[in-house]
Image (cartoon, rainbow, N blue to C red):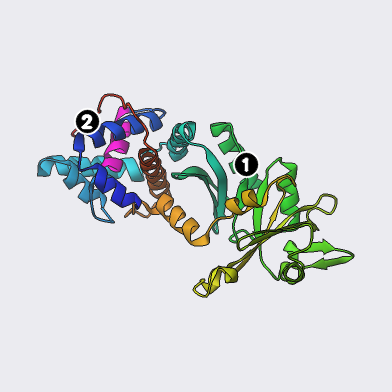
Amino acid sequence: MTERDLAQELVEDPKRFIELLSWHMATVTRRLRRREQRDNAFAYVAGHLVSSAPKVSLRGLGRLLAVNEDQSANRFESLQHFMAHSTWDPLTVVEGNARLVLSELDAFRWRARQTHDRWFLVADTEHGSVSLGWSRLDNQDVAESLIELVERARRWTQTAPPLVIDLCYRSVAADRARLHSAGLTYLVAVHGRESAGAATVGNRHLVPEEVARIVDTQRAKKGVLKQGPFYAIRLSSMASSERPEWFLIYDGESTGPEADPRWTRQYWWSNLPAAFSQRQLASLLPDEREQFESDAAQLELFVYDGRSVRGIEHNWALGAAASGFLTLVRAGRPREPAAAIWLRAA
């Protein structure tokens, strides 16, 4: 069931929906200083979830949440200021949501995705993904920015499961060494023909595709693990000449003739302990299509019609709060919400 389908199912019982959402939003927005800000956050999330349309403008929300034209105009102006101009920190909402959801659900991995100017971090649970925020790169070192983002999330959750970093990150061996030195356990995707992902085999440095060809001919030998389309072997890499790491191959071709050629073969380096089983390693590698859909649900659950960076980040934060709410509902929590906080007129 998609996020939007679950929301529409919830609103069929308006009283229960309001009680559950009120409890959630009161918790995740408690650090917003003004009551009007907390009310607008609740109204923004509730209005989007109540609407069956994939995109709702702020003016449309004003009409949806009002009982007459005057109230509609007032509600629109209040939401417009709250989203585009108010100086509340969106990461306080993201933090409140992460603390709440991850106090109830265990995350089995964190995933980091890099865009041209930001890192985004999410925690994956059995019932859905939870946003752990973002950090701007600006002129900051790429690896250092990621380390700071993860350290901030650690302070929120007091945990740090394995970190999975996809191919959007142009990994270099030195950066993986820095992640290891920072105490992070990681699985980093690397390109098949790039020296940054090279392994040391004997006296040679082989790029991932070359290593994979050797593995293909030695699958039955000791030291090579097999779990469905996943293969794993302990090797030294350019980032870990003195400590072997896991070199993992996802061979999509072995899943059948209908496998999407874009996902046929992926390569990963991981500093997870040697004691990790093949099943544990395989379970941490994300399905790329599933991952994309999860990220889209986190960042685009609500489509924001403004253009300001502040408004976009406010929208991301409230979308994360809504997604966290639906994740808890999917998991059967909260069981006993607080008394309802009803929508208030602007």
Residue bearing mark 2: 342
| Closer-to-camera residue (227/41) | 227
Residue 194's place in the image compared with 28, above or below, is below
Q: Position of residue 160 (x, y in %)?
A: 61, 38
Q: How many marks?
A: 2
Give the mark nearest the N terminus, 2 or 1. 1
Q: Identify the residue at image location x=40%, y=42%.
A: 327
Q: Is residue 37 magenta?
A: yes
Residue 98 visible here: yes
Residue drawn at (73%, 62%) of the image: 197
Left or right? Give the position of 105 relative to 218.
left
Q: Quadrant of residue 62?
A: top left
| Mark 1 crowdedness (10 Å alpha carbons): few <14, some 14-19, many ≥20 | few
Mark closer to the observer (2, 1): 2
Which residue ends up furthest to the top in the rendered image? Answer: 339
Check disc 2 and give the amino acid type: Trp
Question: Which residues, given as a range, are shown in magenta?
Answer: 35-47
Question: Label 1 is placed on what type of residue?
Answer: Glu
Q: Is residue 242 above or below residue 329?
A: below
Q: Magenta region, mostly helix, strand or loop?
A: helix
Q: Quadrant of residue 182?
A: top right
Q: Position of residue 58 (x, y in %)?
A: 26, 49
Q: Which residue is mark 1?
A: 148
